[in-house]
Amino acid sequence: MLSVGQFFSRHSASFLISLTTVSIAAIAANPGFFLGGLLFAGSYATSTALLKHRQKKKVMQIAGITKEEFKHIETQVLTANKHIQTLSQNYLRVRSVSAFKQLLEMTRISKNIVKIVKTDPRKFYNVEPFFYAHLPSAVELTDKYTMLSKQPVKDKEIQLTLSKTRETLTDLNDTIQIDLKDALANDIDHLQMEIEFANRSNLRRREQLDWRGDDK
C-alpha cells in the first residue's frame, strides 16, 4: 500500500545502499564480477525488505492499526484488484451499450475506493461491505450476465433474466457509489469544517475592516 513516491524512494535508497556495499567489498577483497553480483543482489534484497518493513510500520502507526489488521486489509485490497480486473474484462465483452457504460462506471468507482483504502487503510472499516459483498456480487452478476448475453438462443426466460440482472446491477452500482461516499465521509466532514472556519475568519476580518472604516 505505497504511493508512487514511496515506491521509488524505497527502491532508490535500496539501490544506493547496495551499490555502496558492493563497492566497499570490491575494493577490500576484489572478489570478482560474479561475487560482486551476488553481493549486490543480496544487499539489494535485504535493504529493500528493511525499507519496506519500515514504511509499512510507519503506515500502521499513522493509521493506528495492528500488523494483523494491516495484513488483512492488504489481502482484501489484492482480492478487490482481481475482482476489478474481472469487471474490466467483462465490460469489454458485453454487447449492450447501456451495460457497457454501467460496468465502466462501476469499475471506475471501485478503483477509486480501493485507491482511497490503499492511501489510508483506516478507511477500510468505512467500506467493509464493498470488499466483502458489493464488489464480489458485481463480479458474479456480470459474469453470469456476460455468459447469458452471448447465448445464441434467447427465449423469454433468458430475456427476463437479463433484464432483472441489469436492474440488479443498476441498484448495485448505486450502492457502490454510496460506498465511495462512505470512504470519503471523513474527508468531506473535515473539508466542511475547514470551510466553516474559513468563512467565520473572513467574516470577522470584514467586520474588523468595516469597524475601522466607520471609526475613521
Image (cartoon, rainbow, N blue to C red):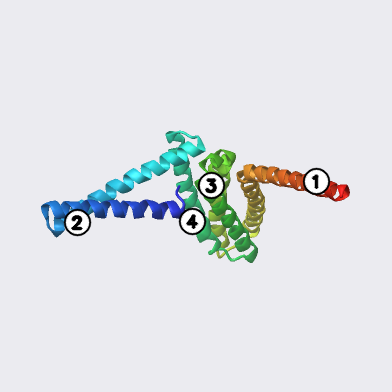
Give the alpha-carbon distance from disc 4 to disc 2, as whole Å: 37 Å
Determine the secondary structure under disc 2. Answer: helix
Spatial separation of the CA atoms under disc 4 and disc 3: 12 Å
- Label 1: state its secondary structure: helix
The type of residue carrying mark 3 is: Pro
Residue under label 2: 37
Q: Which residue is mark 3?
A: 136
Type of amino acid under label 4: Gln
Task: Look at 45% across and 43% down and name the residue there.
Answer: 74
Identify the mark nearer the N-term, 3 or 1. Answer: 3
User: Callout 1, which amino acid?
Assistant: Gln
Residue nearest the viewer, comparing 50 with 91: 50
- The mark nearer the N terminus, 4 or 2, is 2
Residue beneath the point at 28% across and 51% down = 17
Q: Residues within 10 Å of mark 2 (few under 14, many from 20)?
A: few
Mark before the other along the chain sequence, 1 or 2: 2
Q: Which residue is mark 1?
A: 208
Query: Mark 4 = which residue?
Result: 85
Q: Are marks 3 and 1 in contact (CB under 8 Å)?
A: no
Pick whichever of labels 4 and 3 is earlier in the sequence.
Answer: 4
Q: How many marks?
A: 4
In the depicted structure, whether residue 73 falls above or below residue 104? above
**Type of residue at label 2?**
Gly
The structure residue drawn at horizontal position 66% and vertical position 58%, both measured from the top left corner, is 156
In this rendering, position of residue 85 left or right of residue 127: left
- The picture places residue 153, in percent across and down from the top left corner, at 58, 63
